[in-house]
Amino acid sequence: MWRWDGQRWVPSGAQMQQVRPASRTWIWWAAGGCALLLLIGIGGVVWGAIALSNAAQHGTLTCLPSDFPSYPGASVSREYTYFGTGVTSGDTKECQMTLQSSDASSAVHDFYASQLKSGDWTITSDNTQTGVIRFHRVSRAATVGEVLLLGRGQQTQIQIVLDS
């Protein structure tokens, strides 16, 4: 430390205090926190994508009404939804779904034959020879559809068409 005596700089005699360099540990804490948030974010995105994929494969996210019977263990192999002018007169939407099941077609038929006779659904015709079950919604007779069962060896393909 120096002082000006009017003519020159002379030592002041005061002791110099040691100046410590600024601590940079806060940078490491901030970087660690950002890395942790990034990992949590990536984990959340992966978890959400897996949950969405599973829901789509198992028919949770379908164009069918939520009260429509869903065959246990069947996976969705195709889904189409048509809106507007390409649907049956008086309807606004047509839902076409194809499901795959490892069960025999007789078991699948028995499930839909019993489930479509309950709740807000009723069967209008059931042809076991062709594998076609036609049905409609009790509360809205214009909502009609059919379930077509196709045996594929040890598996059954379930084709559902619903006009609403």
Image (cartoon, rainbow, N blue to C red):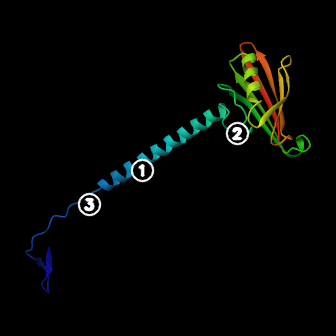
User: Does label 3 or label 2 sit earlier along the sequence?
Assistant: 3
Q: Nearer the viewer, mark 3 or mark 2?
A: 2
Depth check: give the residue in front, 88 or 67.
67
Question: What amino acid is at disc 1?
Answer: Cys
- Which residue is drawn at the image coordinates 69% and 21% (left, top)? 101
Circle 3 residues within 10 Å: few <14, some 14–19, many ≥20: few
For residue 107, what is the image quadrant? top right
Question: What amino acid is at disc 3?
Answer: Ala
Q: Nearer the viewer, mark 2 or mark 1?
A: 2
Distance between mark 3 and mark 2 Cα atoms = 63 Å
User: Does label 2 or label 1 sit earlier along the sequence?
Assistant: 1
The residue identified by callout 3 is: 22
The residue identified by callout 1 is: 34
Image quadrant holding the C terminus, namely top right
- Which residue is drawn at the image coordinates 90% and 40% (left, top)? 88
Circle 2 residues within 10 Å: few <14, some 14–19, many ≥20: few
Q: Secondary structure at mark 2?
A: loop
The residue identified by callout 2 is: 66
Q: Is residue 130 left or right of residue 4?
A: right
Question: What amino acid is at disc 2?
Answer: Ser
